[in-house]
Image (cartoon, rainbow, N blue to C red):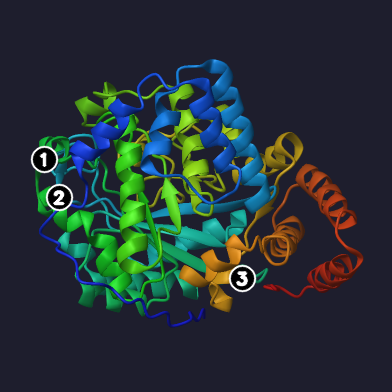
Amino acid sequence: MMTTQEHSISIASYDAKKSFIDEQAIWAAINNAASPSAEQVRQVLDKARQCQGLSIEETALLLQNQNKQLDDELFTVAREIKNTIYGNRIVLFAPLYVSNHCANSCSYCGFNADNHALKRKTLKQEEIRKEVSILEAMGHKRILAVYGEHPRNNVNAIVDSIRTMYSVKDDKGGEIRRINVNCAPMSVSDFKILKTAEIGTYQCFQETYHQATYESVHLKGKKKDYLYRLYAMHRAMEANIDDVGIGALFGLYDHRFELLAMLTHVAQLETICGIGPHTISFPRIEPAHGSELSEKPPYEVDDACFKRLVAITRLAVPYTGLIMSTRESAGLRKELLELGVSQISAGSRTAPGGYQDESQEQFDAEQFSLGDHRSMDEIIYELVTESNAIPSFCTGCYRKGRTGDHFIGLAKKQFIGKFCQPNALITFKEYLNDYAGPKTQAVGTALIERELTAMSPARERNVRNCLAKTEAGERDIYL
């Protein structure tokens, strides 16, 4: 079982009854950056190359740029930063939807309580075991456990389900080594209970940071409380949960405001909690059964704009993991990998029990429609052959205690080459030996050899030794 390093975060006093999202200041930054000159934009791009992040005002200049040539330069800098910090590795995970019971009415979501056509289901422990077994048979080592916001999905039920997930082992030695959690915001005391389940990242999206829009799309349920959700990460960190993940649902309000507000959230966590989010996610509204709003988002973000958002975020918060789900198409996800995305889901299902049952009934229980329907092995094959990327299943940092501010501190020293790349290769070798098809085994083995020959002699010897142990049947080796 995993162990985490106790990380005490000193939370300064804060007023949870007052929003830290200053809407007037955000709009002032946007308006003041109208029609930026090429010189202004290039000055921001030059600063971004230092991998020290950007201010709200600097980010606004990139958002307001209308020069296509400068966008191409933006994408080039995003690629440079992504390669400098993360190299060519891509972390893979799968969502596991435990429950679609929900007590909230959110007008953009298929799970909303007023959608009486939705097939409701909360997995029992044995059903959870079956879902995990299927994910392990794909080769997954990381899960994002997702729970509808409903009283039946209380912290004790969540903890029980997570312990069940960790307990499942397959006959090849496969296991889930890191479970991140997406569930309703909790009190500090409940977050402390959640931490006992040895979770990885706690993930919760504000959806929209624009308070009037937030109140208009959240019609009933506890989720109507904008401020309670806004301060969820403060309470999680107060409970010593090291890693948190935030995000906005693009399409509900102006994308420029949402991105700057999300970066304001990052700055607030750094100021009050001493560390920003471990990950940022980029969901866009996708069609969902029972949601008219999802069919025609009020502020639709097209692919070109979406690519700019991801690239700008990579410049603004260079050391934060950026996540892209299977909401997006295979082609677009490939482009976004180059612009800053460092984690992707693979082989996903968004309904409880969806990995066991792919019938129409399960389709009718999904939260939203998927854009990427490729299998896990197809995704990995294309990562290697088309993106020259190392598919990574590494969870070593978590189990070594390299979390929270410890992880960020090491990341700023560009420790990827020392730990993450070798661990990615070792875990990829596990996948190739235990789960990959013949085509993927061939191209994956060739990729590993190319990466090894590019290492220093000492590191190459060390990694080859680990790979030899993996070849001999040893599992879960990490530096």
Where is residue 367? Give x, y as percent: 31, 41
Circle 2 SS class: helix
Q: Is residue 112 left or right of residue 367?
A: left
Q: CA distance from mark 1 to mark 2?
A: 7 Å
Quadrant for the C terminus in the image: bottom right
Report which residue position mark 2 lands on.
Answer: 226
Circle 3 SS class: helix
Q: Mark 2: which amino acid?
A: Tyr
In this view, the residue in front, 396 or 176, is 396
Report which residue position mark 3 lands on.
Answer: 396
The answer to whether residue 98 of the structure is visible from this angle is: no
Q: Mark 1: which amino acid?
A: Glu
Instruction: Look at the picture and state if 221 lies above or below 287.
Output: below
Q: Are marks 1 and 2 in contact (CB under 8 Å)?
A: yes
The answer to whether residue 190 of the structure is visible from this angle is: yes
Q: CA distance from mark 3 to mark 1?
A: 41 Å
Q: Mark 3: which amino acid?
A: Gly
Q: CA distance from mark 2 to mark 3?
A: 36 Å
Residue at the (35%, 69%) spot, across then down: 161
Residue 45 lies in what quarter of the image? Answer: top right
Report which residue position mark 1 lands on.
Answer: 215
Circle 1 SS class: helix
Badge 2 or badge 3: first in the primary sequence? 2
Assess disc 1: are there few (<14), some (14-19) or many (≥20) residues with their C-alpha within 10 Å of its C-alpha.
Answer: some
Badge 3 or badge 1: first in the primary sequence? 1
